[in-house]
Image (cartoon, rainbow, N blue to C red):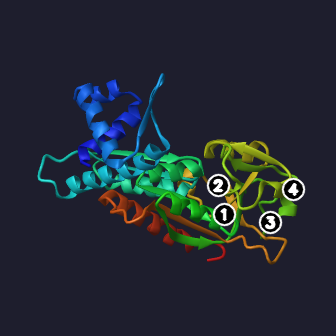
Amino acid sequence: MTLQQLRYVITIAETGSLGKAAERLFVSQPSLSGALKDLEKELGMPLFTRTSKGMVLTAEGDRFLPYARAVEGQYENLLEEFGGLERRRASFAVSTQHYSFAVKAFVEMTQRVDVAEYELAIRETRTQEVIRDVSSLRSEIGVIYLNESNRKPLLKVLDQEGLEFHSLISCGAYVYLWREHPLAGRKSITLEDLRPYPCLAFEQGDAPFYFAEELMSTEKYSRLIHCCDRATVLNLMVGLRGYTLCSGIICEELSGVDYITVPFAAEDPLQDTAMEVGYIDRKNHVHTALGLQYIEEMKNYLRNASGTRPDA
């Protein structure tokens, strides 16, 4: 098995075609096909199925691909850090649940580097996509949270995908709402207080309940509206007096000063509403310089933000 063969597999998977992959790789199609057959023979399993729609990964190929991308990614990291060849344009990407602090940390990191020398990306997306992006090394880092209800199943998923969770901060739950909301003046807010108002939830598609960004089962909320992005959530907070339950760590610089957080008070004293926000990466992953800097920016922001929180 060679690095070149791994690149061939990755490119075929991305293009879905031997012909297109050969064009991108600047090799002949027979040479590409032969290299693929040699690799499949060495592995003792088929990686692709030829269909009328092109080359489709088999179940084994789907498991093999993230490892191939990981090896190629580590090789690129080695070239960037230690290669004596002409320096390549480095890349860095992060995928995250809908956290303004994660975006703020990305901004701070970007301001410290020469953007012309890098290809950078930040993706606010569904929980399942965050995990998938990091598993496939499409993103080096993912940002998610754990709590009592999702910890066990999510950690199991992460382990199956070869990922690890690293805690950044533990915090209580807060109600995030418009500054002019009727409940904005409360010292704390219960679920009963919130019943007349819609909970604004980030859309997760058909994913299991534990991928949700909400703290509790959707059955707990009397009114629920699904949204796809933070801008829509903020607009509905004003237009419909909606709310979300969150970590309380809100970047006013990005979200504006028209929104506040109020501590959430669970009606059941035994209910655990604690949240643990952290980042995920591949097990034994060697982070790039940008990855390390991004993690440090998140830690710096959360360290400073925690000093201004009501329960700090």
Disc 2 designates what residue?
Answer: 211
Contact between marks 3 and 1 (CB within 8 A): the answer is: no
Q: Earlier in the sequence, mark 4 or mark 1?
A: 1
Kindly report which numbered mark, 3 or 2, lies closer to the viewer in this rendering. Answer: 2
Q: What is the CA distance from the residue labelled 3 to the residue labelled 2?
A: 25 Å
Q: Earlier in the sequence, mark 2 or mark 1?
A: 1
The amino acid at mark 4 is Arg
Residue 181 image position (x, y, % from top left): 78, 54
Disc 1 designates what residue?
Answer: 150
Q: What is the CA distance from the residue labelled 3 to the residue labelled 1?
A: 23 Å
Q: What is the CA distance from the residue labelled 2 to the residue labelled 1?
A: 7 Å
The amino acid at mark 3 is Ile
In the picture, measured across the screen, residue 150 lies left or right of residue 242, that is: left
In the picture, measured across the screen, residue 287 lies left or right of residue 219, that is: left
Contact between marks 3 and 4 (CB within 8 A): the answer is: no
Contact between marks 4 and 1 (CB within 8 A): the answer is: no
What secondary structure is found at the residue carrying circle 1? Answer: loop
Vertical side of 299 occupied by 162: above or below: above
Kindly report which numbered mark, 4 or 2, lies closer to the viewer in this rendering. Answer: 2
Residue 191 in view, yes or no: yes
Q: Residue at x 72, y 70 (%)?
A: 273
Kindly report which numbered mark, 3 or 4, lies closer to the viewer in this rendering. Answer: 4
Q: Earlier in the sequence, mark 4 or mark 2?
A: 4
Give the camera-side residue of 258 and 156.
156
Q: Is the residue marked by circle 3 packed among few (<14), some (14-19), or many (20+) residues within 10 Å?
A: some
What secondary structure is found at the residue carrying circle 4? Answer: loop
